[in-house]
Amino acid sequence: MVQTRKSNLKSRSWRLEQPIRKKPYFETIVYGVLLGYRPTKGRGERDNGTWVVRVTKNDGTDWTKAIGKADDFDKSDGNIILSYDQAQDKAKETAKTGKPIGDDTVAAAIDRYETDLKGRGGDVRSVSRLRLHLSDKLARKDVGSLTKEELEAWRDSLKGKMKPASVNRTITALRATLNMVADGNERITRRPWAVGLRAIGGAGKARNVILDEQDVRTVIGAAYQDSNEFGLLVELAAVTGARPSQLLRLQGEDVQAGFTSAGRRQPRLMMPVSRKGRGEKKIARRPVPIPESLANRLTGRTGQLLHRPDGHRLGMTNLPRYFEAFIKGLRLSQPKVTIYALRHTSIVRQLLAGVPIRIVAALHDTSVQMIEQNYSEHIADHADELARPTLDTFAEVIVPPADSNVVVSFRKRRPKGTTS
């Protein structure tokens, strides 16, 4: 009787017990074909591991390819997330097909990275920006043959085309793409892009536009003159400080304007979280307070909460451009104002009002670190008015009035029993 060797990779509990590492755990499924599993983690926490196939033959053939994500936490779908048995079948199929021509090029890797992002519900706009600025020569190169010098030259070529922060966002997308390829092939070294795609300096200084109260009122009023629907969008952006992409995902049922168990009315929006970052978000929506008058105007809507004036769906494609054209005719204290200025203003307004920074970060779906990095300069400008109410006039207690006959002695008091 032939006994079948028990597979560790088949056991989900065994896979989750393994420490995070770059090199996959391999087992042979048929001669010359190995199925591998590499434990991975997302931003700060464990993520679905990666299934890998490795093909080795006597003729010197030796190649590795990532074939999907493991069903460590999410249910398998047979496409992106695979069970152990599905991973075995795909590994055999991939081995029979052979190493596809051009499969390891940068362009092909970007396609796979985009598919992975969509599967995780991530924001794919960074991929579009990357494709726009990637040179044809770099796109055709195999990931394993990239050099530090050519990646560094490409990164530096972006400096004259965009701001430092935009350069860093673009190269971050390429780094993530190349890392995904390296995750499935331990023979590929990450050093070329770890060094050649280092972030450039000068991107950390915030250039956020902060509006005063009169400017905000002017913008909201002008938006309502444009149309009621556009006015609602701009008012919501000013009140909540949410990103436009979050506002456009709001649904009618996200408006909560009823009464609490205590009989108090506390209107709020269940704001969708942003799609930034890796992995599936644990919280899909966060409560954000809004004024009762605004809640009354939003109550009763169904489907997408905000619409175009003609009733059709709003999208991110033309919104920034439309806002830019709309703002040109207004007299504001700041020379260049985008719709994100309303978000920056909301954050600074709450900080100056004494709202704890952790609460400000939660309400605006960001981190304390990002707020401290981007808004500390604006808080410092108002530090005097914030700190002054905490000062005490100690001098009035210690120093007597000028016309007083009281004599204040500053001689030290000698201990009892001592002589002069």
Image (spheres, rainbow, N blue to C red):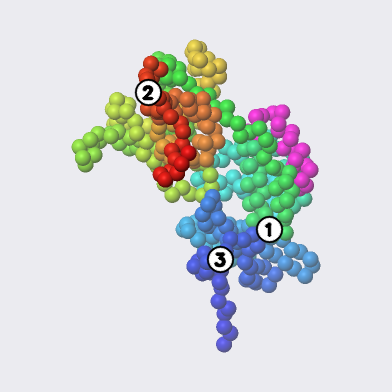
Q: Left or right: where does residue 67 sit relative to residue 398?
A: right
* Residue 255: image location, x then y, percent: 32, 35
Q: Amino acid at mark 3?
A: Gln
Classify 10 Å Cα crowding around label 2: few (below 14), some (14-19), many (20 and above).
few
Classify 10 Å Cα crowding around label 3: few (below 14), some (14-19), many (20 and above).
few
Q: From mark 2 to mark 3, how far is it between C-alphas?
A: 78 Å
Q: From mark 1 to mark 2, how far is it between C-alphas?
A: 86 Å
Q: Amino acid at mark 1?
A: Asn
Dot 2 lies on which element?
A: loop
Classify 10 Å Cα crowding around label 1: few (below 14), some (14-19), many (20 and above).
many
| First to last magenta residue range | 146-167
| Residue 234 colored in magenta in the image | no
| As drawn, 27 above or below 169 | below
- Mark 1 or mark 2: name the one nearer the start of the chain: 1
| Residue 152 colored in magenta in the image | yes
Residue occupying the point 30% across, 33% down: 267
Q: Amino acid at mark 2?
A: Val
Residue 18 disc label: 3
Q: Where on the picture, by quarter, is residue 374?
A: top right
Q: From mark 3 to mark 1, how far is it between C-alphas?
A: 19 Å
Q: Which residue is mark 2?
A: 406
Query: Does the residue at mark 3 contact the one at mark 1 (Cβ under 8 Å)?
Result: no
Residue occupying the point 46% across, 33% down: 411
